[in-house]
Image (cartoon, rainbow, N blue to C red):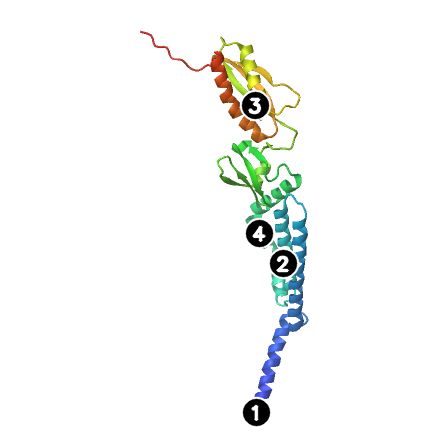
Amino acid sequence: NRNTDIIITRWIMESTIEQLDSLFKGGFVNGILTILFYIIVFLIANHLITKFIRQREFKHKEAVLRIKSVLLWTLLIFSALSQITFLQDIATTLLAGGGIVAVIVGLASQEAASSAVSGMMILMSKPFKVGDTIILKEYDLRGKVTEITLSHTVIETLEKNLIMIPNTLVNKAIVENMTHETEYKIAYLSFDVSYESDLDKASEIMKEVITNHPLYYDVGKEVKIHCTELKDSGITLRARMTTRNIDDSFELCCQCRLQIKKAFDEAGIEIPYPHITLTK
């Protein structure tokens, strides 16, 4: 009859509500409202912190934003899950088997954790920054740093190839920062001349060509020409010159090689090279 249907329906509703209430701390309604509250707080905090970070001049802004996201999402997930009752039993089980879990997680994440720690060391010690040109001597690698993350460093080579290097390798390598901020950069340019050549004249030509070049940066010291080696076929003269930055150094050396070679030819100064003499 009708009264029986009403009683059964009421019993089903009460049972369903009791089951839902048992799933959450403080009941179903309070649990859902609490989770919604956490989500709202998360969205507001995420917006405010992101806005604050973007308005500040951080050298590694993207890395800071990633760390912020990981921390906030972790806090939100654990806060929301803490309202669900049955997860307490799962947490107890995980803690009971924590030794096995720790070993598995430790083995799986050892490389990732090592790279993350190395990335933090690079970000804090700042041996180089995005935009710097660096040389990793162990790997015979040179390029411009385009990105630094917690796991890897990205380098763009002269051929415009992007190379992603794990930070664990970067921390172990000897890194030469070619664009370290200084007043000027020193570059060297070497030429071999024959023993019969006029060394004073050759030195004057090298000095004149370099000094008159627009990329040469005069820091109050004249261009020095040194005799660095006496070879079997010739004498090595090396010029010490200064430029404003490493890019200018490369361009100055390239252009001066051509100009000095032409000036040597006009002055009759010979650059030694292998000769073959045929006799009958």
Label 3, label 1: how far apart the Cα atoms are: 105 Å
Residue 23 in which image quadrant: bottom right
Label 4, label 1: how far apart the Cα atoms are: 59 Å
User: Which numbered mark, 4 or 1, is in the foreground of this view?
Assistant: 1
The disc at residue 213 is 3
Residue 132 in which image quadrant: top right
| Quarter of the figure with the N terminus | bottom right
* Local secondary structure at mark 3: loop
Comes first in the chain, label 4 or label 1:
1
Q: Residues within 10 Å of mark 3 (few under 14, many from 20)?
A: few
User: Which numbered mark, 2 or 1, is in the foreground of this view?
Assistant: 1
The disc at residue 195 is none
Residue denoted by label 1: 2
User: Which numbered mark, 3 or 2, is in the foreground of this view?
Assistant: 3
The answer to whether marks 2 and 1 mark residues whose Cβ atoms lie closer than 8 Å is: no
- Tag 1: amino acid: Arg
Label 4, label 3: how far apart the Cα atoms are: 61 Å
Residue denoted by label 2: 95
